[in-house]
Amino acid sequence: MAEGTGKVSGLIAAEEIEQARERIAGRVVRTPLVRSPALTDMCGVPVHLKLEHRQTTGSFKLRGATNAVLSLGEQERARGVVGVSTGNHGRGLAYAAKAAGVRCIICMSELVPGNKVAGIEALGAEVRIVGRSQDDAQVEVDRLVREAGMTMLPPFDHRAVIAGQGTLGLEILEDLPALDTVLVPLSGGGLISGLALAVKSARPEVRVIGISMERGAAMRDCQKAGKPIPVEEMTTLADSLGGGIGLENRYTFAMVRELVDDIVTLSESEIAEGIRHAYWREQEVIEGSGAVGIGALLAGKVQAEGPLVALVSGRNIDMALHHKVISGEEPDIYGET
């Protein structure tokens, strides 16, 4: 992994990330990068948190969704947009579409928490619940594209989405030029692909490490297999990291293979520890997917020789679940899977 940027430059160009930053300027928040005294003391190197959970819709997904919607042609805007989501992409796409006056339908599986469904509906998008996986929900997306002529804007495997997420890498480097390592939540790979391209185009020596959960880590399993494969979707505290990467993956599988230095996975208890640390030591409410970088540091699964950034990607957690986790209770979310 992480052989350089040459092979993927034919897929997504670093210039597209700069263009995305200009396109979405004023429409998304430039989130703060803050030093964590507690994690710095523990790790022995400066540790910073990129507080992207403070983004307008509560996660980084607004960046890619906004860039994608603003990149549409006039006819595409008139027909509306549709996408599949585990929650945060749907919220970002719903917000971006509403701001642009574009109709939006979000298709989701039964595994998506109710608070995330409600959050999307509150932004004016129509939600359709289909099956028990993102692949099931994708069937409805494909039907709407085929029969209604809507434009599909997927959560990760789309060049405008990847470029939009890559703006985070530009911000991190500007705020911390001495960056040594960055920890990035990893699911379908749109976030880490764009961020890694932005960072490594300027600083190839920076390590980019993807952090996922042990329960259904699709990108890790696909990389091990050497190709996109079906991966069972399971309930997890890091629910936003669920879902497959798509058997016809065009961009992110290759970009992760080329640009990401390592992939680390966490147990559910390690994710819970990340949530608890964020609340009790950093005074931040974050969801499981946003806590995986912190969790990896607490578990001793990542070391760095210089300044490190853990990207805190989202805050959209059910607050009753959050209360259980920070109180040390075992959340009853796993069922039989």
Image (tube, helix red, strand yellow):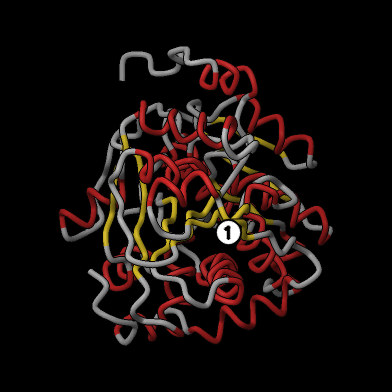
Total marks drawn? 1
* Residue of label 1: 153
In which quadrant is the C terminus drawn? top left
Determine whether, in the image, residue 109 is placed left or right of residue 280. left
Where residue 315 sits, quadrant-wise, is top right
Name the amino acid type tagged 1: Leu
Viewer-proximal residue among 278 and 222: 278
Where residue 32 sits, quadrant-wise, is bottom right
Q: Secondary structure at mark 1?
A: loop
Relative height, residue 121 to residue 59 (above, below) = above
Relative height, residue 134 to residue 208 (above, below) = above
Residue at x 44% of width, y 40% of height: 134
| Rendered location of residue 159, percent (x, y) | 51, 71
Relative height, residue 253 to residue 36 (above, below) = below
| Rendered location of residue 75, percent (x, y) | 73, 70
| Rendered location of residue 122, percent (x, y) | 79, 35
In which quadrant is the N terminus drawn? bottom left
Determine whether, in the image, residue 228 is placed left or right of residue 27. left
Viewer-proximal residue among 27 and 151: 27
Viewer-proximal residue among 297 and 133: 297
